[in-house]
Amino acid sequence: MLAHGKTIVSIATAYKAVKSGYQAAIMVPTAILAEQHMESFKEILDKYEIKTELLISSITKKKKEEIIERLSKGEIDIIIGTHSLLEENVQFKNLGLVVTDEQHRFGVRQRSKIVSKGKNPDVLVMTATPIPRTLALILYGDLDISIIDELPPNRKKIETYAVTKQLEQRVNNFIEKQIKMGRQAYVVCPLVEENEEIEAQSVIELAQKYKNKIFPNYRVEYLHGKMKAKEKDDIMQQFKEGQIQILISTTVIEVGVNVPNACLMVVENAERFGLAQLHQLRGRVGRGENQSYCILKYQGNSEVIRQRMKVMQDTNDGFIISEKDLELRGTGEFFGTKQHGLPEFKIANLFSDMEMLKEAQALANKIVDEDKHLEKEENILLKKMVEKRFENRINI
């Protein structure tokens, strides 16, 4: 399994940190993603005698204690883990690099907590969710931003089709055709349990329909966020190993899992997802050398729905998609749900007022550069406002 994209960037950065005498922490949102990273890191770094370890909740208490002790003594160079890395007893001898993958899954406090375990370590935050460049300047104005906008070698463009319910039988025939070719399929729907008020397929209901009626000859399993972590990881591992042909899921699969043999993504009620989220889901396929497909099943005939589906069919450029998503849906729902760290303004609009916000940001940076502690007469009122708004949280 050869690493590419964000993963290879984090491996190269961690290598540099270790060779400079520091330890590196790689924090990811799920155990299966942590295990996947572990494989990639070891495959490349073992030959350089760099010691990499995994810290996730499923490892034994004895093993965990041993890892924590070795980490504090500096006997481990790179630790890869989930939220387990945030626990108080996880201490480093010389933490010099913190990498957070799929950073929007972690709150600001979680990121600052792991950073505080080192003495001013370098920080690398990574996401596959394309953020409009102008919005990125506001969200991550304190960071240097780099963008990888090329596909790895031999990757083919994912063919995307938006279809209505009338074509359901053809979609099912196409799923079966892919399975007979030895491929696997994801089916994503927006709800976990049936809600009569909302015309959306629930994961459990749809899984039963697929298992008993549509695909009784194939192994169908389901996955959703209310399941226990171990249960989710077991199902995902079996899918990765090819034991499951069709995986029905909520958006829990949008993050990071690499299954090159999964070449088909079907999204139920696609009109209920944001474009950036649909793009992220589509990125779960097309990870091998075979042609991959994304089928967006939608209901409704409004102009906005048709316009959104057309954007997904016409382009694979995540930045064009994210700009359109921001324009059509606004910032509050940009990532599908409201995320930690996304600013909400009473008056300003992050899309239409971008130039003014950039100007305000530049002015704020200028004030900080010239008067770090806001002691000049012209900044006294500003200092009082900041103190009032952030009382007990900052020390100016």
Image (cartoon, helix red, strand yellow):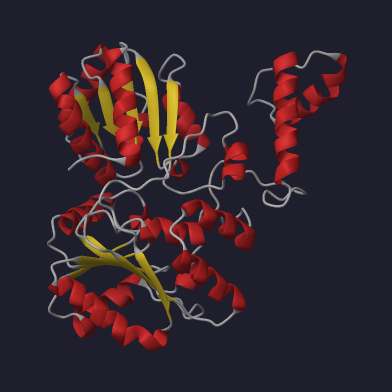
Residue at the image point whose x is 36% and y is 56% from the top = 283
Q: Would you say residue 248 is visible in this rendering? A: no
Above or below, comparing residue 282 to residue 90 in the picture: below
- Left or right of residue 283: residue 68: left
Above or below, comparing residue 232 to residue 95 in the picture: below
User: Residue 25 falls in which quadrant of the image?
Assistant: top left
Tell me how many marks there are.
0
Residue at the image point whose x is 18% and y is 23% from the top = 66
Above or below, comparing residue 296 to residue 52 in the picture: below
Nearer-the-camera pick, 263 or 94: 263
Pick out the residue farthest to the bottom.
Answer: 166
**Image spot of residue 368 (x, y percent):** 71, 19
Residue at the image point whose x is 83% and y is 20% from the top = 379
User: Residue 58 falls in which quadrant of the image?
Assistant: top left
- Left or right of residue 181: residue 390: right
Nearer-the-camera pick, 85 or 151: 151
Q: Quadrant of the N terminus?
A: top left
Q: Would you say residue 121 is visible in this rendering? A: yes
Q: Quadrant of the C terminus?
A: top right
**Image spot of residue 209 (x, y percent):** 27, 81
User: Residue 3 falls in which quadrant of the image?
Assistant: top left
**Image spot of residue 90 (x, y percent):** 32, 24
**Image spot of residue 279 (x, y percent):** 43, 58
Pick out the residue farthest to the right.
Answer: 377
Nearer-the-camera pick, 219 or 242: 242
